[in-house]
Amino acid sequence: AFLCEWAYEVYDQMEHPALGQSPRDAFLQGLIHTGEREHRAIAYDDEFLMESSPTTRKGAAKVEPGRGIKIHGIYYSAPPLRQPGVEGTQVKVRYDPFDIGTAYAYVRRGWVRCVSQYHATLQGHTEKEMLLASKEIRRQQQLHTANAAVTARRLADFLAKASAHETIRQQRLRDLEVRAVLEAIAGEPPNRTESLAPLQDGLETPEAHLPRLSPVDIATLPVFEEYQ
């Protein structure tokens, strides 16, 4: 909310040294001289989202028989990946940084939604949460062994009880705010629970669990002893 207010109500209306006027005035003048140029507009649709979504370092992943594609140590699968001629091949992949329970693979001229085997636990958790959780898992494992592998199962178990970790909680709240901004850009009504998993009890603010107290009249309180 504060970022949007700064961008549209402060920065957008301040005089820019390179423009000699505010960015908003420059934009409005451009509309007067050239129009909206609707033919140059890029639709904010599924195709745009797929092309602009992050991918792996190679941009593709191998379809492993019976397991699917592997992204950041997590396997994702879908029925089209099990079709003859698809298993064993390299396919383009994308993932949603706001939902590590879901990924996408380009199969036979179309994007296919794939889900993790731990989708029920991972859905709605973000990429940054995953990175923080992986770091914490490695730290805990290094206390017992030098070989600290982070598996998808271990990551899912950790995120299921991550409410006890303050760093995960803070990152989660930040991701919720970013998601709200993206929904506003897309013109969607706010619906955080659809994309991000709901906050667990441990992730709520402490004030949420405090009982409502009635105001106290200090004059009516009994005096037990005077402090000298």
Image: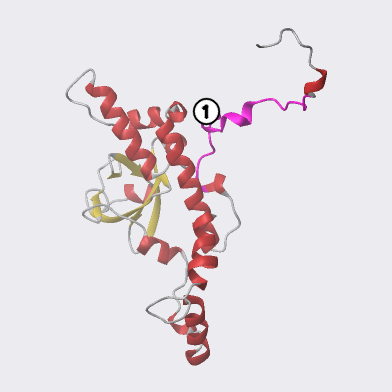
Asked if residue 123 can be seen in this view, the reply is no
Q: Which of 46 and 143 is in front in this view?
A: 143
- What segment is highlighted magenta in the picture? 195-216
Q: Which of 202 and 44 is in front in this view?
A: 202
Asked if residue 29 can be seen in this view, the reply is yes
Q: Which amino acid does label 1 sit on?
A: Gly
From the top left corner, tell me how far across and down residue 16 is, in percent: 42, 75
Question: Residue 173 magenta-drawn?
Answer: no
* On screen, residue 40 above or below 79: below
Q: Is mark 1 on a helix, strand or loop?
A: helix
Residue 135 horizontal side relative to residue 19, left or right: left
Residue 185 horizontal side relative to residue 50, left or right: right
* On screen, residue 128 above or below 146: below
Residue 97 horizontal side relative to residue 28, left or right: left
Residue farthest to the left, as pictured: 146
Residue positioned 43% across, 48% down in the render = 98
Residue farthest to the top, as pictured: 224
In the picture, the quarter occupied by the C terminus is: top right
Judging by the rendered image, the residue that carries numbered circle 1 is 202
